[in-house]
Amino acid sequence: MIQPKDREETAGGCLDIQELFSSPPTEIYPAHEHSQERGLYIHIPFCVSKCSYCDFASFAGQDHRIEDYLQALSAELQVLSQLTENEVFTSIFLGGGTPTALGKERLAYLLDQITSQFHLADDAEWTCEANPESATLEILTAARQAGVNRLSLGVQSFDTEELRLLARIHGPDAPQQALVYARAAGFENISLDLMFGLPEQRIEAWEETLDRALALNSKHLSIYGLILEGGTPLEKQVAQGCIPQPGEQSYLDMENLLIDKLQSAGFIRYEISNWSLPGYQSRHNRLYWRQDPWLGAGLSAHTFWRGRRYCHSSDLDTYIRAWQGPRHSGVLCDIHGPEIIDPAREAEDAVIFGLRMIEGIDCENFLKRYGYRLEDRWHMELAQAFERNWLVMTEGHLCLHPSAIPISNEVFELFIDIKD
Protein backbone atom coordinates (compact mmCIF):
# COMPACT_ATOMS: atom_id res chain seq x y z
CA MET A 1 0.00 0.00 0.00
CA ILE A 2 1.22 3.49 -0.83
CA GLN A 3 1.82 5.67 2.20
CA PRO A 4 2.10 9.47 2.12
CA LYS A 5 5.33 10.41 0.40
CA ASP A 6 8.42 9.80 2.43
CA ARG A 7 10.04 12.81 4.01
CA GLU A 8 13.42 13.01 5.67
CA GLU A 9 12.93 12.26 9.36
CA THR A 10 14.31 14.89 11.68
CA ALA A 11 15.90 14.02 14.96
CA GLY A 12 13.33 13.46 17.68
CA GLY A 13 12.71 16.48 19.84
CA CYS A 14 10.11 18.57 21.64
CA LEU A 15 7.87 21.17 20.05
CA ASP A 16 5.73 23.84 21.58
CA ILE A 17 2.03 23.18 21.20
CA GLN A 18 1.52 26.38 19.29
CA GLU A 19 3.67 25.07 16.45
CA LEU A 20 1.43 22.07 15.85
CA PHE A 21 -1.99 22.75 17.27
CA SER A 22 -2.58 26.46 16.86
CA SER A 23 -2.66 28.38 13.63
CA PRO A 24 -3.19 31.89 12.30
CA PRO A 25 -6.77 32.52 11.12
CA THR A 26 -5.51 32.86 7.55
CA GLU A 27 -4.38 29.23 7.40
CA ILE A 28 -6.78 26.74 5.81
CA TYR A 29 -7.04 23.07 6.78
CA PRO A 30 -9.77 21.52 4.62
CA ALA A 31 -9.82 18.17 6.42
CA HIS A 32 -10.38 19.80 9.80
CA GLU A 33 -12.94 22.30 8.55
CA HIS A 34 -15.09 19.96 6.50
CA SER A 35 -15.08 16.79 8.60
CA GLN A 36 -17.12 15.96 11.68
CA GLU A 37 -15.01 12.86 12.37
CA ARG A 38 -12.12 12.86 14.85
CA GLY A 39 -9.98 9.82 15.61
CA LEU A 40 -7.66 8.79 18.43
CA TYR A 41 -5.16 5.96 17.91
CA ILE A 42 -3.25 4.55 20.89
CA HIS A 43 -0.36 2.15 20.38
CA ILE A 44 0.41 -0.67 22.80
CA PRO A 45 3.73 -2.27 21.75
CA PHE A 46 3.74 -5.37 23.95
CA CYS A 47 3.15 -8.93 22.72
CA VAL A 48 3.42 -12.40 24.19
CA SER A 49 5.56 -13.33 21.18
CA LYS A 50 6.74 -11.72 17.96
CA CYS A 51 5.28 -12.98 14.69
CA SER A 52 7.67 -13.84 11.88
CA TYR A 53 6.10 -11.37 9.39
CA CYS A 54 5.68 -8.41 11.74
CA ASP A 55 7.69 -5.20 11.36
CA PHE A 56 5.45 -3.10 13.62
CA ALA A 57 6.86 -1.41 16.70
CA SER A 58 6.10 -4.32 19.02
CA PHE A 59 8.12 -6.33 21.49
CA ALA A 60 7.97 -9.69 23.25
CA GLY A 61 9.65 -10.31 26.59
CA GLN A 62 9.42 -6.67 27.66
CA ASP A 63 6.68 -6.95 30.28
CA HIS A 64 8.97 -5.31 32.84
CA ARG A 65 8.68 -2.08 30.80
CA ILE A 66 4.88 -1.96 30.78
CA GLU A 67 4.53 0.24 33.88
CA ASP A 68 7.06 2.78 32.61
CA TYR A 69 5.40 2.81 29.21
CA LEU A 70 1.92 3.36 30.62
CA GLN A 71 3.20 6.26 32.71
CA ALA A 72 4.75 7.85 29.63
CA LEU A 73 1.60 7.21 27.60
CA SER A 74 -0.55 8.76 30.34
CA ALA A 75 1.62 11.89 30.25
CA GLU A 76 1.15 12.20 26.51
CA LEU A 77 -2.60 11.58 26.69
CA GLN A 78 -2.90 14.32 29.30
CA VAL A 79 -1.17 16.82 27.01
CA LEU A 80 -3.25 15.79 24.00
CA SER A 81 -6.49 16.03 25.94
CA GLN A 82 -5.63 19.60 27.00
CA LEU A 83 -4.90 20.50 23.38
CA THR A 84 -8.20 19.15 22.15
CA GLU A 85 -10.56 19.95 25.01
CA ASN A 86 -13.16 21.37 22.61
CA GLU A 87 -13.06 18.41 20.22
CA VAL A 88 -15.41 15.42 20.23
CA PHE A 89 -13.85 12.13 19.20
CA THR A 90 -15.91 9.73 17.11
CA SER A 91 -13.44 6.85 16.93
CA ILE A 92 -10.86 5.37 19.30
CA PHE A 93 -8.57 2.52 18.33
CA LEU A 94 -6.22 0.61 20.63
CA GLY A 95 -3.71 -1.18 18.42
CA GLY A 96 -0.34 -2.80 18.71
CA GLY A 97 1.22 -4.98 19.54
CA THR A 98 -1.49 -6.63 21.61
CA PRO A 99 -3.48 -4.32 23.91
CA THR A 100 -5.05 -7.27 25.74
CA ALA A 101 -1.53 -8.43 26.67
CA LEU A 102 -1.58 -5.63 29.27
CA GLY A 103 -3.86 -7.72 31.47
CA LYS A 104 -7.13 -6.70 33.10
CA GLU A 105 -5.92 -4.10 35.62
CA ARG A 106 -3.53 -2.26 33.33
CA LEU A 107 -5.97 -2.24 30.43
CA ALA A 108 -8.74 -0.92 32.69
CA TYR A 109 -6.37 1.82 33.91
CA LEU A 110 -5.63 2.91 30.35
CA LEU A 111 -9.27 2.88 29.30
CA ASP A 112 -10.14 5.04 32.31
CA GLN A 113 -7.47 7.53 31.24
CA ILE A 114 -9.21 7.86 27.88
CA THR A 115 -12.77 8.22 29.15
CA SER A 116 -11.82 10.68 31.88
CA GLN A 117 -9.75 12.99 29.67
CA PHE A 118 -11.32 13.02 26.19
CA HIS A 119 -14.80 13.98 25.00
CA LEU A 120 -16.24 10.94 23.22
CA ALA A 121 -19.27 11.07 20.95
CA ASP A 122 -22.32 9.22 22.24
CA ASP A 123 -22.09 6.89 19.24
CA ALA A 124 -18.28 6.65 19.20
CA GLU A 125 -16.76 3.46 17.83
CA TRP A 126 -14.16 2.13 20.26
CA THR A 127 -11.99 -0.71 18.97
CA CYS A 128 -9.49 -2.85 20.83
CA GLU A 129 -7.18 -5.31 19.11
CA ALA A 130 -6.62 -8.73 20.68
CA ASN A 131 -4.97 -12.04 19.94
CA PRO A 132 -6.72 -15.32 20.77
CA GLU A 133 -4.23 -16.32 23.47
CA SER A 134 -4.79 -13.12 25.50
CA ALA A 135 -8.52 -12.67 24.84
CA THR A 136 -9.72 -14.04 28.17
CA LEU A 137 -13.25 -13.56 29.48
CA GLU A 138 -11.94 -11.46 32.36
CA ILE A 139 -10.01 -9.04 30.14
CA LEU A 140 -12.73 -8.75 27.51
CA THR A 141 -15.37 -8.11 30.16
CA ALA A 142 -13.26 -5.32 31.64
CA ALA A 143 -12.82 -3.76 28.20
CA ARG A 144 -16.52 -3.93 27.38
CA GLN A 145 -17.55 -2.46 30.72
CA ALA A 146 -15.13 0.43 30.18
CA GLY A 147 -16.84 1.35 26.90
CA VAL A 148 -14.98 -0.62 24.22
CA ASN A 149 -17.66 -1.73 21.74
CA ARG A 150 -15.69 -3.29 18.91
CA LEU A 151 -13.15 -6.13 19.04
CA SER A 152 -10.55 -6.84 16.36
CA LEU A 153 -9.15 -10.35 16.73
CA GLY A 154 -5.88 -11.34 15.04
CA VAL A 155 -6.46 -14.81 13.58
CA GLN A 156 -4.45 -14.83 10.31
CA SER A 157 -5.01 -18.54 9.63
CA PHE A 158 -6.78 -21.68 10.83
CA ASP A 159 -4.10 -23.96 9.43
CA THR A 160 -1.62 -25.45 11.90
CA GLU A 161 1.38 -25.33 9.54
CA GLU A 162 0.64 -21.78 8.45
CA LEU A 163 0.34 -20.63 12.06
CA ARG A 164 3.72 -22.22 12.78
CA LEU A 165 5.25 -20.49 9.74
CA LEU A 166 3.90 -17.14 10.94
CA ALA A 167 5.16 -17.84 14.49
CA ARG A 168 1.64 -17.48 15.87
CA ILE A 169 1.39 -19.09 19.28
CA HIS A 170 -2.33 -19.90 19.23
CA GLY A 171 -3.78 -23.06 17.72
CA PRO A 172 -6.46 -23.26 15.00
CA ASP A 173 -9.28 -23.68 17.52
CA ALA A 174 -8.33 -20.76 19.80
CA PRO A 175 -10.24 -18.08 17.82
CA GLN A 176 -13.52 -19.91 18.34
CA GLN A 177 -13.01 -19.92 22.12
CA ALA A 178 -12.00 -16.24 22.04
CA LEU A 179 -15.26 -15.39 20.29
CA VAL A 180 -17.22 -17.33 22.90
CA TYR A 181 -15.59 -15.14 25.55
CA ALA A 182 -16.13 -11.98 23.49
CA ARG A 183 -19.85 -12.58 23.11
CA ALA A 184 -20.18 -13.53 26.76
CA ALA A 185 -18.52 -10.20 27.60
CA GLY A 186 -21.12 -8.38 25.51
CA PHE A 187 -19.33 -7.78 22.20
CA GLU A 188 -21.48 -7.91 19.10
CA ASN A 189 -19.26 -5.99 16.68
CA ILE A 190 -16.32 -8.35 16.12
CA SER A 191 -13.73 -8.28 13.34
CA LEU A 192 -11.25 -10.99 12.34
CA ASP A 193 -7.87 -10.45 10.66
CA LEU A 194 -6.88 -13.00 8.00
CA MET A 195 -3.84 -13.29 5.75
CA PHE A 196 -3.24 -14.98 2.38
CA GLY A 197 -0.44 -15.25 -0.14
CA LEU A 198 1.76 -17.03 2.40
CA PRO A 199 4.84 -18.99 1.35
CA GLU A 200 3.80 -22.51 0.29
CA GLN A 201 0.14 -21.77 1.04
CA ARG A 202 -2.26 -24.20 -0.58
CA ILE A 203 -5.55 -22.89 -1.94
CA GLU A 204 -7.33 -25.74 -0.14
CA ALA A 205 -5.96 -24.49 3.18
CA TRP A 206 -7.00 -20.94 2.31
CA GLU A 207 -10.52 -22.12 1.52
CA GLU A 208 -10.72 -23.89 4.88
CA THR A 209 -9.56 -20.72 6.66
CA LEU A 210 -12.27 -18.69 4.92
CA ASP A 211 -14.94 -21.29 5.71
CA ARG A 212 -13.97 -21.42 9.38
CA ALA A 213 -13.86 -17.63 9.63
CA LEU A 214 -17.32 -17.29 8.12
CA ALA A 215 -18.65 -20.00 10.45
CA LEU A 216 -17.73 -17.80 13.42
CA ASN A 217 -20.32 -15.20 12.32
CA SER A 218 -18.19 -12.10 12.81
CA LYS A 219 -19.42 -8.81 11.38
CA HIS A 220 -16.17 -7.69 9.74
CA LEU A 221 -13.13 -9.24 8.07
CA SER A 222 -9.80 -7.53 7.38
CA ILE A 223 -8.00 -9.67 4.81
CA TYR A 224 -4.47 -8.83 3.76
CA GLY A 225 -2.19 -10.25 1.14
CA LEU A 226 1.14 -10.94 2.81
CA ILE A 227 3.81 -8.30 2.29
CA LEU A 228 7.30 -9.53 3.12
CA GLU A 229 8.70 -6.60 5.06
CA GLY A 230 12.47 -6.24 4.94
CA GLY A 231 14.36 -7.59 7.91
CA THR A 232 11.59 -9.76 9.30
CA PRO A 233 12.40 -13.45 9.92
CA LEU A 234 9.94 -14.56 7.25
CA GLU A 235 11.39 -12.21 4.65
CA LYS A 236 14.87 -13.52 5.39
CA GLN A 237 13.73 -17.13 4.96
CA VAL A 238 12.24 -16.33 1.57
CA ALA A 239 15.26 -14.24 0.49
CA GLN A 240 17.57 -17.11 1.40
CA GLY A 241 15.50 -19.52 -0.67
CA CYS A 242 14.44 -21.60 2.34
CA ILE A 243 10.77 -21.29 1.42
CA PRO A 244 9.17 -20.13 -1.85
CA GLN A 245 6.62 -17.41 -2.32
CA PRO A 246 3.32 -18.24 -4.05
CA GLY A 247 3.28 -17.47 -7.75
CA GLU A 248 1.23 -14.58 -9.13
CA GLN A 249 -1.50 -16.86 -10.45
CA SER A 250 -1.80 -18.67 -7.13
CA TYR A 251 -2.16 -15.32 -5.37
CA LEU A 252 -4.89 -14.20 -7.78
CA ASP A 253 -6.71 -17.52 -7.39
CA MET A 254 -6.76 -17.04 -3.62
CA GLU A 255 -8.05 -13.50 -3.97
CA ASN A 256 -10.78 -14.58 -6.38
CA LEU A 257 -11.79 -17.33 -3.98
CA LEU A 258 -12.15 -14.90 -1.08
CA ILE A 259 -14.26 -12.57 -3.26
CA ASP A 260 -16.63 -15.39 -4.21
CA LYS A 261 -16.90 -16.73 -0.65
CA LEU A 262 -17.47 -13.39 1.05
CA GLN A 263 -19.94 -12.05 -1.49
CA SER A 264 -21.95 -15.27 -1.22
CA ALA A 265 -21.99 -14.82 2.57
CA GLY A 266 -23.41 -11.29 2.28
CA PHE A 267 -20.21 -9.37 2.97
CA ILE A 268 -19.54 -6.08 1.20
CA ARG A 269 -16.06 -5.05 0.20
CA TYR A 270 -15.85 -1.42 1.27
CA GLU A 271 -12.05 -1.00 1.06
CA ILE A 272 -9.35 -2.97 -0.74
CA SER A 273 -8.53 -5.10 2.31
CA ASN A 274 -11.72 -4.77 4.35
CA TRP A 275 -15.11 -6.50 4.19
CA SER A 276 -18.15 -6.18 6.40
CA LEU A 277 -21.78 -7.07 6.73
CA PRO A 278 -24.02 -4.05 5.98
CA GLY A 279 -23.72 -1.40 8.68
CA TYR A 280 -20.52 -2.79 10.21
CA GLN A 281 -17.81 -0.94 8.29
CA SER A 282 -14.99 0.20 10.55
CA ARG A 283 -15.49 3.85 11.31
CA HIS A 284 -11.81 4.21 12.18
CA ASN A 285 -10.68 2.65 8.90
CA ARG A 286 -12.90 4.97 6.90
CA LEU A 287 -11.57 7.95 8.86
CA TYR A 288 -8.04 7.17 7.64
CA TRP A 289 -9.04 6.63 4.02
CA ARG A 290 -11.08 9.83 3.94
CA GLN A 291 -8.18 11.79 5.46
CA ASP A 292 -10.18 12.99 8.43
CA PRO A 293 -8.15 14.26 11.41
CA TRP A 294 -6.68 11.90 13.98
CA LEU A 295 -4.29 11.96 16.92
CA GLY A 296 -1.75 9.20 17.52
CA ALA A 297 -0.44 8.49 21.01
CA GLY A 298 2.29 6.06 22.01
CA LEU A 299 5.28 4.44 20.39
CA SER A 300 5.59 4.99 16.61
CA ALA A 301 2.12 6.54 16.43
CA HIS A 302 1.35 9.01 13.64
CA THR A 303 -0.80 12.14 13.89
CA PHE A 304 -2.64 14.16 11.24
CA TRP A 305 -4.19 17.25 12.82
CA ARG A 306 -4.87 20.78 11.57
CA GLY A 307 -2.74 20.33 8.51
CA ARG A 308 0.20 18.93 10.47
CA ARG A 309 1.71 15.48 10.47
CA TYR A 310 4.27 14.03 12.85
CA CYS A 311 5.16 10.69 14.39
CA HIS A 312 6.86 9.28 17.47
CA SER A 313 9.99 7.18 17.69
CA SER A 314 9.68 3.40 17.35
CA ASP A 315 12.36 2.96 20.04
CA LEU A 316 10.84 2.06 23.39
CA ASP A 317 13.53 3.69 25.53
CA THR A 318 13.41 6.92 23.52
CA TYR A 319 9.67 7.27 23.91
CA ILE A 320 9.67 6.51 27.64
CA ARG A 321 12.56 8.88 28.38
CA ALA A 322 10.88 11.68 26.46
CA TRP A 323 7.80 11.58 28.67
CA GLN A 324 9.40 10.82 32.03
CA GLY A 325 9.11 13.37 34.81
CA PRO A 326 6.90 16.46 34.98
CA ARG A 327 6.11 18.05 31.66
CA HIS A 328 4.69 21.44 30.84
CA SER A 329 1.30 21.10 29.15
CA GLY A 330 2.57 23.27 26.33
CA VAL A 331 5.17 20.77 25.11
CA LEU A 332 4.85 17.72 22.91
CA CYS A 333 7.74 15.25 23.21
CA ASP A 334 9.51 12.80 20.92
CA ILE A 335 8.38 14.47 17.71
CA HIS A 336 9.77 13.12 14.43
CA GLY A 337 9.30 14.37 10.91
CA PRO A 338 6.89 17.24 11.60
CA GLU A 339 5.55 18.69 8.38
CA ILE A 340 2.84 21.06 7.26
CA ILE A 341 0.38 19.50 4.85
CA ASP A 342 -0.89 22.30 2.65
CA PRO A 343 -4.27 21.96 0.89
CA ALA A 344 -2.64 20.86 -2.36
CA ARG A 345 -0.79 18.01 -0.65
CA GLU A 346 -3.85 17.11 1.39
CA ALA A 347 -5.92 16.85 -1.80
CA GLU A 348 -3.32 14.54 -3.32
CA ASP A 349 -3.47 12.25 -0.28
CA ALA A 350 -7.27 12.38 -0.34
CA VAL A 351 -7.22 10.98 -3.89
CA ILE A 352 -4.68 8.24 -3.17
CA PHE A 353 -6.36 7.06 0.02
CA GLY A 354 -9.90 7.71 -1.20
CA LEU A 355 -9.43 5.38 -4.13
CA ARG A 356 -8.72 2.55 -1.68
CA MET A 357 -12.39 2.68 -0.74
CA ILE A 358 -14.66 0.76 -3.07
CA GLU A 359 -17.17 3.61 -3.03
CA GLY A 360 -14.33 5.82 -4.28
CA ILE A 361 -14.14 9.60 -4.04
CA ASP A 362 -17.30 11.65 -3.77
CA CYS A 363 -16.53 14.28 -6.43
CA GLU A 364 -19.03 16.80 -5.04
CA ASN A 365 -17.52 16.54 -1.56
CA PHE A 366 -14.02 16.86 -3.03
CA LEU A 367 -15.09 20.11 -4.75
CA LYS A 368 -16.54 21.49 -1.50
CA ARG A 369 -13.46 20.58 0.50
CA TYR A 370 -10.74 21.77 -1.89
CA GLY A 371 -12.48 24.29 -4.12
CA TYR A 372 -11.74 22.65 -7.46
CA ARG A 373 -12.70 19.56 -9.40
CA LEU A 374 -10.49 16.51 -9.79
CA GLU A 375 -10.22 17.08 -13.53
CA ASP A 376 -9.06 20.67 -12.99
CA ARG A 377 -5.81 19.38 -11.49
CA TRP A 378 -5.43 15.84 -12.87
CA HIS A 379 -6.95 16.07 -16.33
CA MET A 380 -4.21 14.10 -18.12
CA GLU A 381 -3.85 11.52 -15.35
CA LEU A 382 -7.58 10.84 -15.27
CA ALA A 383 -7.72 10.53 -19.05
CA GLN A 384 -4.89 8.00 -18.94
CA ALA A 385 -6.57 6.01 -16.15
CA PHE A 386 -9.94 5.92 -17.93
CA GLU A 387 -8.28 4.87 -21.18
CA ARG A 388 -6.62 1.95 -19.40
CA ASN A 389 -9.90 1.02 -17.72
CA TRP A 390 -8.37 1.59 -14.27
CA LEU A 391 -11.05 4.02 -13.06
CA VAL A 392 -14.80 4.37 -13.47
CA MET A 393 -17.28 7.10 -12.58
CA THR A 394 -20.33 5.77 -10.72
CA GLU A 395 -23.08 8.10 -9.50
CA GLY A 396 -20.69 10.97 -8.94
CA HIS A 397 -17.98 8.84 -7.34
CA LEU A 398 -14.56 8.22 -8.89
CA CYS A 399 -13.75 4.55 -8.21
CA LEU A 400 -11.17 1.93 -8.98
CA HIS A 401 -12.37 -0.48 -11.63
CA PRO A 402 -12.65 -3.92 -9.98
CA SER A 403 -10.09 -5.31 -12.41
CA ALA A 404 -7.59 -2.64 -11.30
CA ILE A 405 -7.65 -3.51 -7.60
CA PRO A 406 -4.69 -5.96 -7.90
CA ILE A 407 -2.60 -3.16 -9.48
CA SER A 408 -3.96 -0.35 -7.31
CA ASN A 409 -0.50 0.97 -6.37
CA GLU A 410 0.22 1.58 -10.04
CA VAL A 411 -2.99 3.58 -10.30
CA PHE A 412 -2.22 5.64 -7.18
CA GLU A 413 1.20 6.59 -8.52
CA LEU A 414 -0.50 8.65 -11.26
CA PHE A 415 -1.64 11.14 -8.64
CA ILE A 416 1.61 11.58 -6.72
CA ASP A 417 3.25 14.90 -7.44
CA ILE A 418 6.96 14.04 -7.44
CA LYS A 419 9.15 17.02 -6.60
CA ASP A 420 12.92 17.20 -6.79
Image: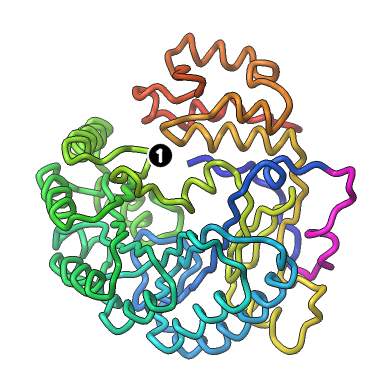
Determine the residue positioned at 50% across, 23% down: 398
The question of residue 18 being in magenta is answered with: yes
Image position of 377 with respect to 9: above or below: above
Question: What colouring method underlies this structural image?
Answer: rainbow
Q: Nearer the viewer, residue 46 or 152?
A: 152
Q: Which residue is mark 1?
A: 271
Image position of 224 with respect to 115: above or below: above
Q: Nearer the viewer, residue 330 or 369?
A: 369
Left or right: residue 96 compared with residue 81: left
Image position of 230 with respect to 410: above or below: below
The question of residue 53 being in magenta is answered with: no
Determine the residue positioned at 47% across, 17% down: 393
Which stretch did the figure color magenta? Answer: 13-27
Q: How many marks?
A: 1
Residue 146 figure quarter = bottom left
Residue 275 figure quarter = top left
Decide: few, some or many residues near mark 1? Use Cα within 10 Å; few <14, some 14-19, many ≥20.
Answer: many
From the top left corner, tell me how far across and down residue 270 is, in percent.
38, 38
From the top left corner, tell me how far across and down residue 360 is, in percent.
48, 30
Image position of 266 with respect to 36: above or below: above
Determine the residue positioned at 68% across, 33% down: 369
Q: Secondary structure at mark 1?
A: strand
From the top left corner, tell me how far across and down residue 58 is, in percent.
46, 70
Q: What amino acid does circle 1 point to?
A: Glu
